Every structure is written in structure tokens, then in C-alpha cells.
Image (cartoon, grey):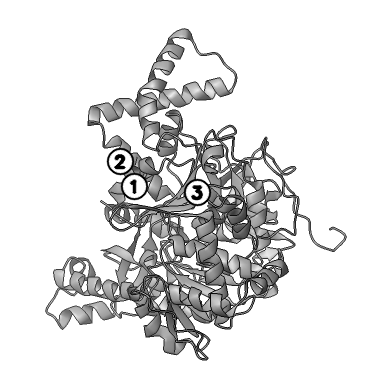
């Protein structure tokens, strides 16, 4: 035991630091002056870039973005908010999202992220749990969801609408501001009522331990919990990020390149927003669109940094293969395997045989260059995280010379804790710890993380009650092992979260609970690890189902009943009703019905009649996988 009486956890060696990386050196640094600094140093550089709904390219300079951020901050303060108050944002990722985030950073407020797919019931939970006083809504449809829930939110005072009708002339200060105002009206009010000196005073007062964001993430049971993340959490990750290499055009456009974000405004996008401004990149993002447009948008954006979740990588992979005939695609896959082998040999310092070198050089300039061209031709680093990744897909892109790296983190670690790099990569691992981060495994194999990036805790929970961080170590719920070189390999999950290929972790319990409310259903078991959506296996109540069938002149034996269209229609209707109460990612898109109930004797249920998920998933995987075809 150590001097404090705690049982020490054996670490796998010292913190691994990649060559050329900064180490965190200023634990007191915050993001409060970031937007103001960039506007002062690089006023004309492009801070944000996007395409509007008709496809026209739009951008904000750092000076313009700071003007919007400052106006938003002063406007929120004019509504009576004070440092530490929570401002929820219910919107897709767009320029107003980023400037609201910077407004919160500069004024000591706390942003709370809500995905645009959030349903009213979830809005009630999140806004009620965090005590948000203001919610910023993307459009009238999002505002309508808030309006429907407002009577259950006693602390909510104001809504701000991004996409508002044409703004009326400034009415001047009002003693009692309207409950809903446009973003433009909010900024006008703030500039009239709150001085720049007051905002500067609040910026100077922000400390590293102050909260910047609360991001709600699924727990193993019950409702979502809010991860409370501080300025210091994010700064520690930003300091650990590789310095941008010299960019030939940087002197001309004052930018180190483009970060293109394809996800919604959640864990990864939150980090990318502040990283872009920290390292002077231009932040570009999608404004929606069909999945098959993703590759075209990436190619047009020509990003230097491209954060991806597995689903987006799968879409790119499918799009690339679709450009060839089946025979040519097969040859390309074979060439990529050979290319990966050649690259690995070169990295080990081996000389390639002359004929192999000749083939590799030729293929590097043709096929491999064609594949890299799908990423825009300027890519320095593509990261993939958030869910298990297909090794076949990773191998293909790595073999073609795409600088694609796997990394690992959680919302609780400000999105990242370990990473591979293009120069230090171990296929099948999620890399080594960031500078300033320690990773260890507990005796049962659970991955533990300690560092300045580890969150403050779950909003509203005391650590002695919840215990996610103990003795400074975050207990991740993931299982893994660390090799002699410090590379982490994930081997499984302790908790029951289902990690979709979107990178979103969902708990199956809300869906399953809603389905089990129907008397026909005895068990509902969600499935979807690494898949784009959930599906669910259902079993029928062996006492109630025959009665229900007899009343409808249907077969009363369970195997025959499971094939009856009338029963399947009833179960599909029940699924639709359950889905209607849930956020998109928590919904199932298909069901399969078992011809018998789950069994204690078969090991499918525990003695307390809880479902043994690994057994059920393994035993009925064929039926469940068939639902994705």
C-alpha cells in the first residue's frame, strides 16, 4: 500500500511520448482567450468553412468568428447568466455551434451538447438534469421539441433560435426579455447591455478547473449521465497533439490546413472545434446530405486532419471499391495487402527485392495514389475511433499509403487517451498513451486511465457514490492488454453498452424495457456492436401468447405463432411505439422472433433471470446478422 493507504495499481512502464510532441507544461492554461487571441493575430484567416443548403461555399474569418462569439457571450450574460451556468445547444454542427462554444469558453459558461435527433423525453432529462437556463436551437423544428417539454423544465428561462426570420430593428433593452429570441437579437441585446470590459474580466477569471462542457453519454443502466469536462481537460489533450508541420501556404493564408469533421456535435467534434482554433487550422464540416456524398465532400475539402468513426470509414471504403469492377476491386485488395507488407518491411529497415521495389514504385504512383486521391490529396492524418474497426478496411487503406491511425478514448477523457501515429503504428492496437497520460490494466483486465484529460466526474454524482474515478484512475469498463512497447489492445467490454459503428455508445435498456411492457413479449435483447443500428431479438410470453392467439383464431403453439403475419404486425407496431420515445441511435430497425423463450438451463438466463447477453448473442448470431442484409 502507498503512503495514502491506497492499493497501488501496477502501470505498464512510463508514459510514452511520440517524437516531436509537446508535453503538457502549463496546468493553469484555459481556452478563455483563444477566440480573442486568434482574431488579434490572424484576423483575415479562415476560421470556419462550410457549404450552405444550396451548395455555396461560406466561411468566417477569425475576426468575424470572434465578433459572433463575443456578441453571443455578451448576449447570454444579458439574460442574467453567470459563470458556471449551463447553456444547452440543440443543433447539428455549424458555425453558430462553434461560436456558441467559444462564447461559453470566454465567459465562463458551460455548454451542454444535444444531438439534433434528441427526442422531447430526452430533452427533459438532459436539460432538467444539468439545470440549463438557456437552450440554443438550430431551427423551428428543434424549438418545437423544447416547447413541448418546457412545462417540465422549471429552470429553463430562454430559448435562442439560430435560423430565425429576418431580424427586426433593434428594439433596445427590455426589462423582461422575451422567452424566445433570435441569435441576432441576442447579440444585439448583449452589445447594448454588457460591456467588453466586463466580458474581459470574466475571461481573466476563468480557471483550468472550471467546466467548459457537459456531454451526456450512456451508462450501463438507466438514463444518460453528463460527463463534466473542464478547460484543463481539453488543454491537456490539445498540448499533447502533434505540432502542425510547416505548411507552405501558411504565410499566405495564415492557416495550417483544414480539419474536416463529418460527425455530429458530440465527443469527437467537440475536441476538433477547439483543436482547430488551438493549432490554427480551418474547421470545415458537413451540413448533412446523403451518405454517398461523403467521399465527394472530403475530396473537395482537401483536409489535412480527418477524424472518422468506423461507419464513415466503411462508407469511404465502399465508395472506393464501387469505382472499380468486381475483378478490378479484387486485384486492388490484393495489391493493398502486398503494399502493406512492403511498407512494413521498409519500416523495419529492410531493403525490398528489386522486382518488388519496381512494382511498389509503379503502384505507388498509380493505384495507391488513386486511393489516396479520394481523401483530397493533402491528408496528413486520418484518425478512426469510437467503436471497433474492421482490420480488413484498416489494412486496405494502410497498404495504399493513407495515413490512417486508430486511437482510443472516451467522452470521459475529452475524447482521446491513446493513439497510433503514422510513424509509430501497430495494426490491431489503439496505440500508446498521449503525453501526460498513463494507461494500466486492473487485475481483471479492465483498462484504467490517469491524466489531466480525465473528466471531473458525472454531473450530479459524487464519486463515492458512483466510483468511476478511483485513486485518480478512470475505470473505463473496457478490457485490454498492453505490450512491452506500450501499445494498448482492446479485447472486450465489461459493461453492456453497445458501440454502434457511428461511434455512439448506446445502452440497450430503454429499448428493451419499452418492448417488454407489451404482455406478448417476455424478453427483448438488443444487438448491434459495430453495426450502423440496433436490431432486437424477441421471445414470446408462453402463458399470455397462446391466449392472445386463441382470441384471434391463430395457432396457439409458439413455433407456428411466430410465423403468423398478424403477430409480426403486432410486434412491429410495438417496436414503432417504443422507437417513437427514443433518440435515433437507441431505436431498433428490425426484429427477429425466437420460437421459444430464453432458458435458465441453457445458460441464457442467470439465476435471477437476467439475460446473459454474450450467450444469447453468440447462440442466435445467425438470425440477428440476417437482419442487416
Marks 3 and 1 close (CB-CB < 8 Å) = no
Q: Earlier in the sequence, mark 2 or mark 1?
A: 1
**72 horizontally vs 594: left or right:** right
Residue corresponding to mark 3: 282
Residue farthest right in this picture:
3
Question: What is the number of the mark on residue 294?
Answer: 1
Q: Hey, which quadrant is residue 461 in on the image?
A: bottom right
Q: Earlier in the sequence, mark 3 or mark 1?
A: 3
Q: Is residue 93 visible?
A: yes
Toward the viewer: 471 or 185? 185
- For residue 537, above or below residue 619: below
Q: Residues within 10 Å of mark 2 (few under 14, many from 20)?
A: some
- For residue 476, above or below residue 251: below
Q: Secondary structure at mark 1?
A: helix
Marks 2 and 3 close (CB-CB < 8 Å) = no
Q: Residues within 10 Å of mark 1 (few under 14, many from 20)?
A: some
Residue farthest left in this picture:
553
Residue 433 percent location from the top left of the image: 65, 45
Closer to us: mark 3 or mark 1?
Answer: 3
Toward the viewer: 228 or 594? 228
Q: Is residue 409 visible?
A: no
Q: Hey, which quadrant is residue 400 in on the image?
A: top left
Q: Marks 2/1: CA distance?
A: 9 Å
Toward the viewer: 427 or 383? 383
Closer to us: mark 2 or mark 1?
Answer: 1
**431 horizontally vs 157: left or right:** right
Residue corresponding to mark 2: 319
Q: Residue at x 22, y 82 (%)?
A: 547
Amino acid at each position: 500500500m502507498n503512503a495514502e493507504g491506497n492499493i497501488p495499481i501496477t502501470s505498464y512502464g512510463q508514459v510514452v511520448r511520440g517524437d516531436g510532441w509537446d508535453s503538457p507544461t502549463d496546468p493553469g492554461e484555459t481556452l478563455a482567450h483563444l477566440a480573442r487571441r486568434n482574431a488579434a493575430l490572424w484576423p483575415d484567416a479562415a476560421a470556419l468553412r462550410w457549404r450552405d443548403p444550396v451548395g455555396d461555399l461560406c466561411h468566417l474569418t477569425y475576426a468575424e468568428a470572434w465578433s459572433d462569439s463575443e456578441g453571443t457571450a455578451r448576449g447570454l450574460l444579458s439574460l442574467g447568466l453567470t459563470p458556471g451556468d449551463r447553456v444547452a445547444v440543440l443543433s447539428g454542427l455549424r458555425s453558430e455551434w462553434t461560436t456558441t462554444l467559444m462564447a461559453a469558453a470566454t465567459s465562463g459558461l458551460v455548454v451542454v451538447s444535444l444531438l439534433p435527433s434528441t427526442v422531447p423525453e430526452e430533452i427533459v432529462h438532459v436539460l432538467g438534469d444539468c439545470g440549463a437556463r438557456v437552450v440554443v436551437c438550430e431551427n423551428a423544428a428543434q424549438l418545437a421539441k423544447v416547447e413541448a417539454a418546457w412545462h417540465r423544465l422549471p429552470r429553463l428561462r430562454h430559448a435562442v433560435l439560430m435560423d430565425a426570420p429576418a431580424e427586426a430593428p433593434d428594439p433596445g433593452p427590455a426589462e423582461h426579455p422575451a422567452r424566445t429570441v433570435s441569435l441576432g437579437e441576442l447579440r444585439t441585446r448583449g452589445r447594448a447591455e454588457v460591456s467588453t470590459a466586463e466580458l474581459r474580466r470574466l475571461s481573466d477569471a476563468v480557471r483550468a478547473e472550471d467546466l467548459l462542457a457537459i456531454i451526456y453519454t450512456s451508462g450501463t443502466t438507466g438514463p444518460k449521465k453528463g460527463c463534466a469536462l473542464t478547460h484543463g481537460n481539453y488543454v491537456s489533450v490539445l498540448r499533447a497533439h502533434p505540432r502542425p508541420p510547416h505548411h507552405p501556404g501558411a504565410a499566405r493564408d495564415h492557416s495550417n490546413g483544414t480539419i474536416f469533421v463529418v460527425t455530429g456535435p458530440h465527443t469527437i467534434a467537440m475536441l476538433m472545434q477547439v483543436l482547430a482554433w488551438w493549432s490554427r487550422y480551418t474547421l470545415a464540416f458537413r451540413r448533412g446530405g446523403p451518405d454517398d456524398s461523403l467521399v465527394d465532400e472530403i475530396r473537395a475539402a482537401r483536409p489535412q486532419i480527418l477524424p472518422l468513426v468506423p461507419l464513415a470509414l466503411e462508407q469511404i471504403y465502399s465508395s472506393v471499391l464501387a469505382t472499380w469492377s468486381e475483378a478490378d476491386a479484387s486485384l486492388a485488395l490484393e495489391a493493398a495487402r502486398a503494399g502493406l507488407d512492403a511498407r512494413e518491411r521498409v519500416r523495419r529497415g529492410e531493403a525490398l527485392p528489386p522486382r518488388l521495389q519496381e512494382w511498389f514504385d509503379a503502384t505507388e504512383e498509380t493505384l495507391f495514389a488513386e486511393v489516396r486521391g479520394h481523401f483530397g490529396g493533402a491528408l496528413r492524418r486520418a484518425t478512426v475511433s469510437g467503436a471497433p474497426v474492421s482490420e480488413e478496411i484498416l489494412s486496405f487503406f494502410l497498404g495504399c499509403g493513407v495515413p490512417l491511425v486508430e486511437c482510443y478514448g472516451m467522452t470521459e477523457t475529452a475524447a482521446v487517451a491513446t493513439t497510433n501515429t503514422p510513424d509509430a503504428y501497430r495494426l490491431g492496437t489503439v496505440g500508446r498513451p498521449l503525453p501526460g497520460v498513463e494507461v494500466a490494466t486492473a487485475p481483471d483486465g479492465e483498462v484504467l486511465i490517469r491524466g489531466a484529460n480525465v473528466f471531473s466526474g458525472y454531473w450530479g454524482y459524487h464519486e463515492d457514490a458512483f466510483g468511476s474515478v478511483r485513486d485518480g484512475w478512470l475505470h473505463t469498463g473496457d478490457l485490454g492488454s498492453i505490450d512491452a512497447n506500450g501499445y494498448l489492445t482492446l479485447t472486450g467490454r465489461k459493461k453492456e453498452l453497445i458501440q454502434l459503428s457511428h461511434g455512439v455508445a448506446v445502452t440497450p435498456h430503454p429499448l428493451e424495457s419499452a418492448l417488454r411492457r407489451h404482455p406478448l413479449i417476455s424478453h427483448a435483447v438488443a444487438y448491434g456492436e459495430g453495426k450502423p443500428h440496433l436490431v432486437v431479438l424477441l421471445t414470446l410470453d408462453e402463458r399470455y401468447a397462446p391466449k392472445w392467439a386463441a382470441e384471434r383464431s391463430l395457432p396457439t403453439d409458439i413455433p407456428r405463432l411466430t410465423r403468423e403475419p398478424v403477430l409480426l404486425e403486432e410486434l412491429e407496431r410495438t417496436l414503432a411505439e417504443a422507437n417513437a420515445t427514443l433518440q435515433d441511435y437507441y431505436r431498433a430497425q428490425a426484429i427477429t422472433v425466437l420460437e421459444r423463450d430464453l432458458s435458465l438451463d441453457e445458460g441464457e438466463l442467470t439465476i435471477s433471470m437476467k439475460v446473459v447477453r454474450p450467450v444469447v448473442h453468440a447462440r442466435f448470431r445467425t438470425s440477428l446478422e440476417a437482419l442487416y442484409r
